[in-house]
Amino acid sequence: MSKNPKAEFELTLERFLSDTKKELNVDFPKLKLRIKREGGVQAIRSLLTERDVDSFGFNLLNEKGRLDRSVEQFVINHEDSGFFTHSEIQIAKMRLK
């Protein structure tokens, strides 16, 4: 087990976003900036609680049929991490329905 789970989570998020850009040519510059300022966990938590599903990145991924590369899916994939509340996980799940 990692000595710093949050740092490991941040690296996993960074790889997830990088792979999404390489694979689908979809970038998330505002999210990346927010991650640098707030950290990955807080940036994602804010996105889940502050915005509705109508965002450019989400819509672009939806058009490509690749919501599996969305931040919402990333949260669901890491729901056992302890970084997200039940409510935040439910928001992510609702948006992907």
Image (cartoon, helix red, strand yellow):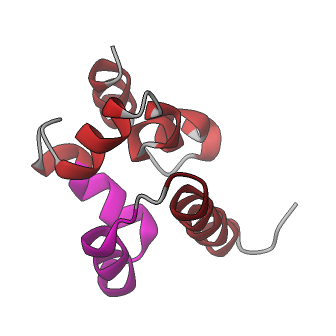
Q: Residue at x 28, y 76 (%)?
A: 34
Q: Report the front residue among 10 and 84.
A: 10
Q: Residue at x 11, y 38 (%)?
A: 52
Q: Position of residue 49 (x, y in %)?
A: 17, 45
Q: Residue at x 34, y 66 (%)?
A: 28
Q: Is residue 84 left or right of residue 42?
A: right
Q: Report the front residue among 96 and 10.
A: 96
* Dominant SS in magenta: helix
Q: Is residue 64 magenta-colored?
A: no
58 lies above or below 41: above
- Quarter that holds the N terminus: bottom right
The residue at the far top in this view is: 97
Q: Position of residue 53 (x, y in %)?
A: 17, 35
The picture quadrant where one finds residue 62 is top left
1 lies above or below 67: below
Instruction: State the extent of the magenta-drawn residues as a range.
Output: 27-47
Q: Position of residue 65 (x, y in %)?
A: 43, 27
Q: Is residue 53 left or right of residue 26?
A: left
Q: Residue at x 30, y 86 (%)?
A: 37
